């Protein structure tokens, strides 16, 4: 294989044997890998070997990777160890990921860990991410966590939102949390959004609830709109009217016609 010219054919051949070689004889495979002249090929080949080794003996694989000189190849191998450790010792994996210099590699490791850890220990995952130093890795981890929590445990996502400082990333969470809460309990979703301070994020969340509310109880959605004011009311009614018009244009127009003339009625008709 060493005699093959550099390129796609050689890389494919290396990829085909790397994992099994790493399971059978990781040290021999790594000695071969160190002689590869292409940094990309060496990085990918060693990463796959270490991944296989870490699944059978994570301690030995970690010891080897920690002895490697700093650089992209070491970071790639460290990522393989972190992924394997996440299954058997998530706390050790988290500490290891935090020890990697900030950058794309660390961000990728932390996001991988979030995906795995939140399924088994969502509260512990939140505490770990909150303990990370401020920076891109922490912001990306919070974003990954919020999306996953919003799908799997929207109440926990809402609690996380309440703990975060006011940032753009925090505001981006609102709509996904509101939609996920509504999937389980529309009234709870509405109550949560209503308690948020006035902001564009709150307005967007209300907009996202409009179509779902219109589907369940259009008259109730319109009555709720009367508690809103200004652009929030107009945009909410437009989203309700748009959904109703798509479902049944005639019924939507009849419903709008039963409302008194004014901006609210105009918004409903505009949506329809």
Image (cartoon, rainbow, N blue to C red):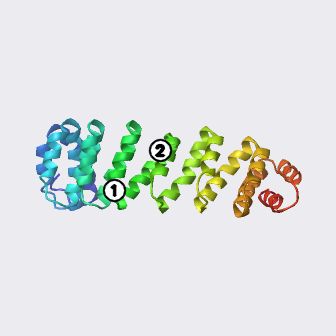
Asked which quadrant contains residue 220, the reply is top right
Give residue 142's mark: none
Find disc 2 in the rendering and name its residue: 149
Q: Residue at x 77, y 58 (%)?
A: 271
Q: Which mark is residue 107?
A: 1
Q: Is residue 260 above or below residue 26?
A: below
- Residue 42, can we see it? no
Q: Mark 1 falls on what kind of element?
A: helix
Q: Position of residue 106 (x, y in %)?
A: 29, 56
Q: Foreground residue, 227 or 28?
A: 227
Badge 1 crowding class, 10 Å Cα cut-off, few under 14, some 14 to 19, many 20 or more, is: many
Percent x, y of residue 90: 29, 40
Q: Is residue 175 left or right of residue 121?
A: right
Label 2: few (<14), some (14–19) or many (≥20) C-alpha neighbours in 10 Å:
many
Instruction: Classify residue 110 as left or right of residue 199.
Output: left
| Element marked by disc 2 | helix
Residue plotted at (23% across, 60% down): 72
Q: Nearer the viewer, residue 135 or 115?
A: 135
Q: CA distance from mark 1 to mark 2?
A: 19 Å
Does 117 sit left or right of 10 as displayed?
right
Depicted 121 relative to depicted 205: above or below: above
* Image vertical order of residue 231 relative to residue 213, above or below: below
| Residue 239 image point, x, y percent | 72, 55
Q: Determine the residue positioned at 37% across, 44% down.
A: 125
Tag count:
2
Whichever of callouts 1 and 2 sits on the residue coming sooner in the sequence is 1
């Amino acid at each position: 294989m060493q005699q093959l010219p550099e390129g796609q054919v050689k890389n494919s051949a290396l990829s085909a044997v790397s994992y099994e070689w790493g399971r059978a004889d990781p040290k021999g495979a790594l000695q071969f890998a160190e002689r590869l002249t292409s940094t990309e090929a060496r990085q990918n080949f060693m990463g796959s070997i270490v991944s296989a080794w870490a699944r059978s003996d994570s301690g030995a694989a970690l010891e080897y990777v920690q002895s490697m000189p700093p650089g992209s190849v070491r970071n790639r191998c460290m990522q393989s160890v972190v992924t394997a450790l996440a299954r058997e010792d998530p706390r050790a994996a988290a500490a290891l990921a935090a020890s990697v210099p900030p950058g794309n590699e660390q961000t990728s490791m932390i996001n991988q860990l979030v995906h795995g850890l939140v399924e088994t220990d969502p509260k512990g995952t939140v505490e770990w991410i909150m303990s990370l130093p401020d920076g891109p890795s922490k912001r990306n981890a919070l974003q990954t966590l919020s999306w996953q929590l919003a799908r799997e445990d929207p109440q926990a996502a809402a609690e996380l939102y309440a703990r975060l400082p006011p940032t753009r990333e925090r505001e981006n969470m609102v709509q996904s949390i509101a939609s996920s809460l509504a999937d389980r309990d529309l009234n709870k979703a509405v109550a949560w959004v209503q308690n948020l301070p006035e902001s564009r994020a709150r307005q967007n969340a209300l907009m996202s609830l409009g179509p779902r509310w219109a589907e369940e109880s259009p008259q109730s959605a319109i009555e709720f709109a009367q508690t809103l004011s200004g652009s929030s009311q107009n945009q909410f009614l437009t989203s309700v009217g748009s959904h109703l018009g798509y479902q049944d244009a005639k019924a939507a127009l009849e419903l709008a016609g039963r409302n008194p003339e004014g901006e609210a009625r105009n918004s409903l008709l505009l949506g329809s």
